[in-house]
Image (tube, rainbow, N blue to C red):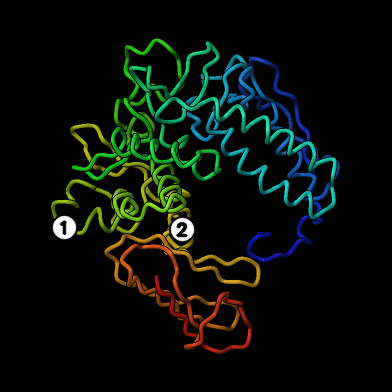
Amino acid sequence: YLEKTGDKSILEETAPFIKGEKVSFGKKETWVGIPNVAKEDSLYQHAIKALEKSFRFGKNNLPLIGAGDWNDGLNNVGKEGKGESVWLGFFLYYNLLKFIDIAEKKKDNSTKKELIKKKNILKKALNSCWDKKWFIRAFHDNKKVIGSRKNKEYKIDLIAQSWSVISGIANKDQEKKLIKSVMNLLYDKKNKTISLFAPPLTEKTKTKYGYIQGYPQYIRENGAQYTHAAIWFLEALTKAKKPELVEKILETINPIIKSNTKEKIEKYRVEPYVIPADIWKEKNHMGQGGWTWYTASSALFYKTVLENVLGIKREKNKLIIDPCIPPHWKEFEVSYQYENTTYSIKVLNKSLTGFKVKKQTINGENVKEIFLEKNGEEKGIIVTL
């Protein structure tokens, strides 16, 4: 919200906390009692407390995974309070970078100093999680490494690789190696799918990961394609400027591409106009869509395609156009409405690179920046790659 609008006043808006029964150690949840409304505080302070909640680090100086991070199917990895999440470390690092800037603008030097300290601790810890060709995913309570090349199952995890790039932790050499590893080990060229992790967990698995082991192999989180994760990898590819791979991952997600022939429809078996949460890879259900309608991946897909693939972003009073499209796309058009002004955007991929803006014009005049206006006029923007 701050990046899009520049409206800092939202940080001073107040909201209450609620206070309920504390969950005792070893107990997963509590349903007793009704929470009470506690004191109010600013949104800024709410955000700081949310960050501080994540500053519970384990022996490897990474955030504790608790009963699961993004993947709640890993609910047994940290049930003893020792398991750590590498992915959550990338995600926290990414948010710290943004919030350090907010604290600086608010002249909150003590908070800024503490956030920088935690950021530096995390950066060192995350760099130590490089596994020669990709980043590991997590540490179990029993110290077992999850997502390592040494594992027979769960060798490589997609969201850890994606967020290492999105967060900026991965250097260029690591970026190149991990993307190659993902495409070799998780991407299925024949069936146009990309797995959440591989290989899947089996009945022979001794380590207890959680309820993810209740799913058959290659169904839902257990080694199938998970749309949310695939979209994060799509974003990572745009940040790494890999336009030739962008199209391949778009094909693993886009429901229209998944169902534009009778043969594909019979394989996909879900609505061609709805994003599914998952796509199965089990041999008898290869390419079949899973749960539809309920997933937030639909909004994330729209946002990622618009802002990262087509590269159209609003930053305060500016419109930034920085695409990363498949190299063979010759052009695309977008109508962008800002208040009462319509911007007709046309991007010409004359270089066939899919990225690198060479020139942009508004109504025929060369411009370095595009400032958004509220004058009710129609403006024609042409961007040349």
Looking at the picture, tell me which residue is in the foreground, 126 or 5.
126
* Quadrant where the C terminus is found in the figure: bottom left
Residue lying at 85% horizontally and 51% vertically, measured from the top left? 107
Question: Seen in the image, is 363 located left or right of residue 9?
Answer: left
Q: Nearer the viewer, residue 181 or 43?
A: 181
Q: Check disc 2 and give the amino acid type.
A: Asn
What mark, if any, has residue 261 been given in the picture?
A: 1
Q: CA distance from mark 1 to mark 2?
A: 28 Å
Which tag is nearer the camera, tag 1 or tag 2?
2
Q: Report the side of 102 relative to 235 (left or right).
A: right
Callout 1, which amino acid?
Thr
Secondary element at tag 1: loop
Is residue 378 shown above or below 289?
below
| Circles 1 and 2: CB atoms closer than 8 Å | no
Disc 2 designates what residue? 308
Residue 232 disc label: none
Q: Secondary structure at mark 2?
A: helix
Q: Which residue: 82% across, 56% down?
A: 12
Q: Which sits earlier in the primary sequence, circle 1 or circle 2?
A: 1
Foreground: 171 or 165?
171
Residue 372 placed where, x, y %? 61, 77
- Mark 2, Cα crowd under 10 Å, few <14 / some 14-19 / many 20+, is many
In the displayed structure, 132 sits above or below 189; it is above
Q: Looking at this view, is 116 or 11 the one in front?
A: 116
- Determine the residue positioned at 44% across, 25% down: 131
Q: Quadrant of residue 127?
A: top right
> Where is the N terminus found, in terms of image quarters?
bottom right
